[in-house]
């Protein structure tokens, strides 16, 4: 792969020198395009080009627009024999530390366009942020897919042969509409679009050349043309969509649906208007995810049918299981999210909760003894944590094994920074995790571990246990960790029943530690017991089961399918 850099510049003086200094170590040729900048900027760019022999400075005699500058750089790179070009903006918004990852992805998938997926901080102007969502919607309509998750990020790697072909066949907008239009039309041309999360900041001294009225009118006109272009290509796009191979992902490879700012919007509406305002915004969002989440929708119906075979008279599962039952399942998940926020913000009072088994947990806590709580993704896990705090004011440490709910947890922390809950983010349960948690147990704290989800790091390390009449994979890690901590272990479930919350606590084992001989058999028995109790409560409240993936899929098979193949790579 022959890779070059392309940087469009129009009167950006503040960050360009530092940007080039950061890029120098890559050893790549850079096409720096001066888009009719003022004399001061032009002189600075000339000085920088003279200072760096790897920088080739191209000039527009007058300002033509960002899109025109990018096209000039891309076409120059292609004419000089480069196969790919990495576009970087000159204003310092992009996290240049992500460039090696983008290059590696482009090498692995040389026919695809690699685009940044912005992860914003508080510096982003809210008007710009919310305006992006309108463009996202229209791009999804224009491509009849959700494959383009962000069409406005100017941090991307172009495959130049396909891009040059597009330039020869199509006239593209030359200003702020370019980034969107080129992505949609490349997609129409059959180019795959792959996204990598990247941090984007808006420097305090940064300069924006987005012209509110003119550029919005220009982008609106572009979307109108793209919409009618989509209508002409609809049969082709639908055929392309049907012909694409269906891939089944392991659940822990599935990204968190919903951006940080989208989740924060719901949290803000909760703070301002309580449940009624939050629900007014949340239910349309749930319907959207239901309509577009084919995998989750199918998994929901599969699970509910399995429960119906065992509980044919369950009031929530009457009639043939169809999309209506699945929609109610999704809505229950949304309502549980509100319960999570209530619990985190201490808005659920003890008078609203039935806790008949509190004495089971009270004894070790009164003695200052730590314990492990084995929980699951059934019901309201946050309420379990909150109630345990309310009971004894004990510190609770929650193991978060993946980043799939990172955005939601980040917003929860902002809603109540003083929460006594400690979220511990780890990628796998290893020796360092065991040492950390041992300290927590010795200090008389609770450690909460979910035992019902395997991960991509658990290949070959799962137990299969009977669950709803079929063998399902359960991770070894939580049960091995509980045995290493050598402390009392309890099961905890919290369900919403008859309009109230009900916390169920059961003594699971005084300890899972024992002789090395027979260790795996002992842990298998523990997993079987856990699966049996999980099934009991899941059959009791099936709509509160929030594992929207194929829970019974053989984990080793799924992980083999999800594991990326090692590509043949060529040096740049």
Image: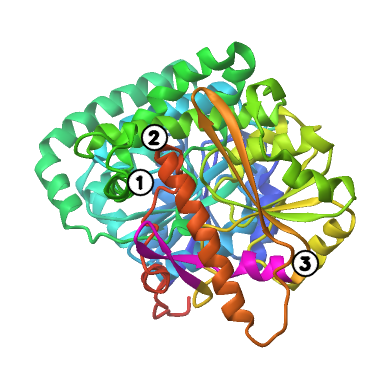
Observer-side mark, 3 or 2, equals 3
Q: Is residue 473 magenta?
A: yes
What residue is at 72 percent from the left and 26 percent from the top? Answer: 346
Q: CA distance from mark 3 to mark 1?
A: 35 Å
Q: Is residue 146 left or right of residue 38?
A: left
Can you give x and y, in whole percent of width and height, for residue 442 in the image? 88, 59
Range of magenta residues = 463-483
Could you tell me if the residues under marks 1 and 2 are in contact, i.e. CB atoms within 8 Å? yes
Q: Which circle's residue, 3 or 1, is located before the other in the chain?
A: 1
Q: Which circle's residue, 1 or 2, is located before the other in the chain?
A: 1
Query: Please, is residue 231 above or below residue 363 in the view?
Result: above
- List the residue tagged with mark 1: 296
What residue is at 57 percent from the left and 79 percent from the top? Answer: 521
Picture colour scheme: rainbow
Mark 2 closeness class: few <14, some 14–19, many ≥20 residues within 10 Å: many
Q: Quadrant of residue 430?
A: bottom right
- List the residue tagged with mark 2: 330
């Amino acid at each position: 792969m022959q890779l070059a850099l392309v940087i469009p510049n129009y009167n950006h003086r503040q960050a360009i020198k530092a940007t080039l200094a950061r890029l120098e170590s890559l050893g790549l040729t850079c096409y720096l395009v001066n888009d009719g900048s003022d004399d001061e900027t032009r002189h600075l760019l000339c000085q920088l080009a003279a200072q760096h022999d790897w920088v080739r400075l191209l000039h527009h005699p007058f300002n033509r627009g960002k899109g025109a500058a990018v096209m000039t750089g891309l076409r120059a790179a292609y004419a000089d024999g480069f196969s790919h070009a990495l576009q970087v903006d000159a204003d310092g918004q992009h996290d240049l530390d992500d460039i090696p990852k983008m290059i590696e992805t482009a090498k692995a998938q040389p026919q695809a366009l690699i685009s940044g997926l912005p992860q914003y901080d508080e510096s982003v102007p809210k008007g710009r942020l919310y305006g992006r969502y309108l463009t996202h919607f229209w791009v999804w309509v224009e491509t009849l897919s959700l494959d383009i998750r962000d069409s406005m990020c100017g941090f991307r790697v172009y495959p130049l042969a396909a891009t040059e072909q597009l330039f020869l066949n199509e006239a593209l907008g030359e200003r702020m509409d370019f980034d969107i239009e080129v992505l949609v039309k490349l997609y129409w041309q059959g180019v795959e679009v792959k996204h990598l999360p990247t941090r984007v900041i808006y420097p305090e001294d940064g300069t924006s050349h987005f012209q509110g009225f003119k550029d919005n009118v220009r982008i609106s006109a572009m979307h109108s043309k793209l919409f009618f272009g989509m209508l002409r290509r609809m049969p082709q796009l639908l055929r392309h969509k049907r012909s694409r191979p269906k891939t089944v992902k392991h659940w822990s490879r599935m990204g968190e649906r919903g951006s940080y700012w989208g989740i924060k919007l719901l949290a803000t509406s909760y703070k301002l208007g309580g449940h009624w305002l939050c629900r007014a915004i949340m239910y349309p969002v749930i319907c959207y995810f239901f309509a577009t989440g084919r995998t989750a929708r199918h998994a929901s119906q599969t699970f509910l049918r399995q429960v119906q075979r065992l509980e044919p008279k369950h009031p929530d599962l009457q009639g043939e299981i169809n999309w209506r039952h699945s929609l109610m399942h999704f809505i229950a998940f949304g309502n549980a999210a509100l319960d999570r926020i209530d619990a985190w913000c201490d808005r659920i009072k003890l008078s609203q909760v039935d806790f008949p088994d509190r004495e089971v947990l009270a004894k070790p806590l009164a003695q200052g003894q730590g314990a492990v709580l084995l929980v699951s993704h059934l019901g309201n896990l946050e309420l379990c944590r909150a109630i345990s705090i309310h009971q004894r004011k004990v510190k609770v440490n929650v193991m978060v094994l993946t980043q799939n709910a990172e955005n939601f947890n980040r917003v929860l922390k902002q809603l109540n920074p003083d929460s006594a809950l400690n979220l511990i983010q780890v990628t796998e349960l290893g020796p360092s995790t065991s040492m950390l948690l041992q300290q927590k147990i010795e200090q008389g704290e609770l450690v909460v571990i979910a035992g019902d989800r395997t991960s991509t790091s658990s290949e070959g390390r799962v137990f299969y246990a009977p669950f709803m009449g079929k063998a399902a994979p359960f991770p070894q890690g939580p049960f091995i960790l509980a045995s290493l901590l050598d402390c009392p272990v309890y099961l905890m479930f919290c369900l919403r029943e008859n309009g109230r919350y009900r916390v169920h606590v059961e003594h699971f084992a005084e300890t899972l530690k024992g002789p090395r001989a027979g260790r795996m058999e002992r842990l298998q028995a523990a997993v079987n017991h856990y699966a049996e109790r999980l099934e009991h409560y899941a059959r009791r409240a099936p709509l509160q089961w929030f594992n929207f993936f194929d829970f019974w899929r053989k984990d080793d098979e799924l992980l083999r399918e999800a594991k990326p193949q090692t590509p043949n790579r060529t040096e740049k």
